[in-house]
Amino acid sequence: MNRPQSIGGAARINDGRTPETGLAAQFAHVRARSLELAAPLSAEDACAQSMPDASPAKWHLAHTTWFFETFLLERFERDFRPFRPEYRVLFNSYYNQIGERYPRPQRGMLTRPPLAEILEYRREVDARMQRLLRESRQASELRELVVLGLNHEQQHQELLLTDVKHLLSLNPLAPAYVVRAAQAPTASPGASAAPAWIDFDGGVVAIGHSGDGFAFDNELPRHEVLLQPFRLGARLVSNGEYRDFVEQGGYANAQLWLAEGWDWLSQNRLAQPLYWRRDESGWKEFTLGGLLPLEPALPVVHLSYFEADAYARWAGARLPSEAEWECAAAACGLAGNFADTGALHPRAAPAGAGLHQMFGDAWEWTQSSYAPYPGFRIAEGAVGEYNSKFMVNQYVLRGGSCATPAGHVRSSYRNFFPTGARWQFSGIRLARDRVR
């Protein structure tokens, strides 16, 4: 359950080739952004855990600090002393090589240490990291770990938002995280138009990260794949289109669902997307801006792989492979509706020809299982656990979402979740085979 990015407008995380002063500024910027995202939360909000897959905001703030203390200060700082030795266990997420871990489903029980102490922990580690960046001469290795840590923190910034959304959705008061998220943009003329298709010739194409900038190890190595001719939907599937699926019995038609998906659906007694509600006035959707009327033209989000696959079958289509998606996205700009816009909710597709919403708005499910690329090598040490240990029973998503920091994703970026995960901003882009 991992992903990477950069924060703050057009700013990008230092890639390890620029001076220490540039990296120090990026470090301060990303670390400050996490505090900005946590600022609207009360101490009670920050401590609660709504389900085992989610973590309290306080834990996110502590764990990202633990990363820098454990992987950088402990290794490079002279006369290193931990802030508190107990934190090595409390805030270790899944790094078995580091040692014992506190149980993930019980993170919401950590009322102590209090939020104030976690914030003090961040301040101390930040000060020591800045000193390390000024004084250290082990430039290359240290910089690489700092850049990894910053991308890791940006992943947790997105998780903080999605975890808070799930938490607040369980409150009968339907509280807003921020009021500005409730200001959904007016739908453009193209947003409700009939779906258009963009054709691609296929052939032998290269996928995977290329260039000198940062990439996670699961994006490597770059390699060639053979694609048959295909077509992609020009935009994401909308709320209105998915509402038709719901109202026409899509959740009751076993023929549309994978066998495991049908079992999952039946066991959980589901009949609609995660945050949809229906009352006498019609459909509503819980957002980070509170409970709002469902906007038909906006992209549908918070769908599991099972739901995305069932809808695609109902629509006479399929989900794209991750290679098809990357082939198409390679020529698209990286601009999109990311967290930095402040919307914190998907926006309608613009009018006009071509592919839209490839980046931002919603993570797009693909039909590709999360697996290593040919020639993949696991990094040595605990950082090698970052991605490789999750390469089983997960599917790949692409493109980033409205909760993803701007600059964090690229066309080769691979997100991944299990088939039943719904609390992320995950949506649908349809694909079809194309006859030559």
Image (cartoon, helix red, strand yellow):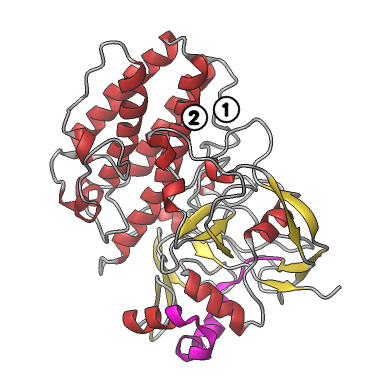
The correct choice, above or below, for 178 with respect to 377 in the image is below
Quarter of the rendering occupied by the C terminus: bottom right
The three-letter amino acid code for the residue at tag 2 is Val
Marker disc for residue 147: 2
Q: Looking at the picture, does residue 113 appear above or below residue 418?
A: above
The residue at which mark 1 appears reads as 15
Q: Nearer the viewer, residue 344 or 28?
A: 28
Q: Using the image as rendered, state which of residue 303 and residue 45 is in the foreground.
A: 303
Measured as percent of width and height from the top left, residue 19 is found at 56, 15
- Residue at image position (73%, 60%) is 355
Majority secondary structure in the magenta region: helix
Does residue 386 sit above or below 29 in this rendering? Answer: below
Distance of mark 1 from mark 2, alpha carbons?
7 Å
Q: Which circle marks residue 413 in the picture?
A: none
Examine the structure image and report whether residue 244 is included in the region drawn in magenta: yes
The residue positioned 54% from the left and 47% from the top of the image is 341
Residue 16 colored in magenta in the image:
no
Magenta range is 234-261
